[in-house]
Amino acid sequence: KNQVEQSPQSLIILEGKNCTLQCNYTVSPFSNLRWYKQDTGRGPVSLTIMTFSENTKSNGRYTATLDADTKQSSLHITASQLSDSASYICVVTDRGSTLGRLYFGRGTQLTVWP
Amino acid sequence: EADIYQTPRYLVIGTGKKITLECSQTMGHDKMYWYQQDPGMELHLIHYSYGVNSTEKGDLSSESTVSRIRTEHFPLTLESARPSHTSQYLCASSEIRGGAEREGGNEQFFGPGTRLTVL
């Protein structure tokens, strides 16, 4: 069964600190993995996309890593800001689907305190 | 920011009412999707469309229906709302581009969502 598991479920950090969110997946065949940021009451917005051959990608203070062998990804946030408070969702695309079937994790709810 | 819009943003209605959730995108995308999301849970695909006059059911069974008469518009209708329909509904769209389609990885752009509460 294709699944995407994220940890931790929730995380509270102080402004300016770094944090790392984890994603494990069993989706196969694998096409790509995206990290989305979803603010409360809003739709998800893509932060990074990684294909099979990529093992790290950065977008400003966000750095995603991918280990396709162990089927693990992480999202590292550097020097957190209050605006980073949101749910971060790991999404894996199934290569075998003509639709480009997406499998969503439940997200990590990040709260940044001043 | 993606050009995909949903109305209303919030809706509180009584049981048995018929409702239509609107979704429009101005990006000319062929593919459109409807997801249902409960608090702390993953998004579940309930409907999708490859283009005009194409509609398919997603993975999560839903009593809602959709239509795709125009490329830019993908409304979702509930004929008789029930409390079990209370949820957040997210609309998304994506386009097909050669290489990216083979990778199955075109980005889906999401609307802001409609928070539906059925009393």
Image: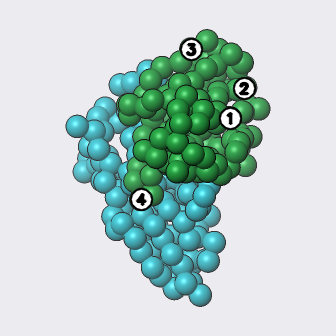
Chain colours: A cyan, B green
Tell me whether the residue at label 4 lies in contact with that at label 2, contact meaning CB atoms closer than 8 angstroms.
Answer: no
Q: Secondary structure at mark 1?
A: strand
Q: Residues within 10 Å of mark 1 (few under 14, many from 20)?
A: some
Q: Badge 3 is on which residue?
A: B54
Question: In the rendered view, would you say B67 is above or below B53?
Answer: below
**Quadrant of the rendering where the N terminus of chain A is positioned:** top left
Q: List the single residue furthest toward the top.
A: B53
Q: Are marks 3 and 1 on the same chain?
A: yes
The alpha-carbon separation of the residues under discs 4 and 3 comes to 31 Å
Q: Position of residue B13 (x, y in %)?
A: 60, 46
Q: Residue at x 68, y 35 (%)?
A: B22
Q: Position of residue B80 (x, y in %)?
A: 52, 32
Q: Residues within 10 Å of mark 2 (few under 14, many from 20)?
A: many
Task: Depth check: give the residue in front, B10 or A40.
Answer: B10
Q: Residues within 10 Å of mark 4 (few under 14, many from 20)?
A: some
The alpha-carbon separation of the residues under discs 1 and 2 comes to 11 Å
| Marked residue nearer the N-terminal end (4 or 1) | 1
Residue type indicated by callout 4: Gly
Residue type indicated by callout 3: Ser
| Marked residue nearer the N-terminal end (4 or 3) | 4
Chain identifier of the residue bearing label 1 in the image = B
Q: Position of residue A78 (x, y in %)?
A: 53, 74
| Marked residue nearer the N-terminal end (1 or 2) | 1
Q: Secondary structure at mark 2?
A: loop
Q: Secondary structure at mark 4?
A: loop
Q: Secondary structure at mark 3?
A: loop
| Marked residue nearer the N-terminal end (4 or 2) | 4
Q: Residue at x 43, y 31 (%)?
A: B62
Choose mark 4 or mark 1, whichever is in front: 1
Q: Are marks 1 and 2 on the same chain?
A: yes
Q: Badge 2 is on which residue?
A: B72
Q: Badge 4 is on which residue?
A: B40
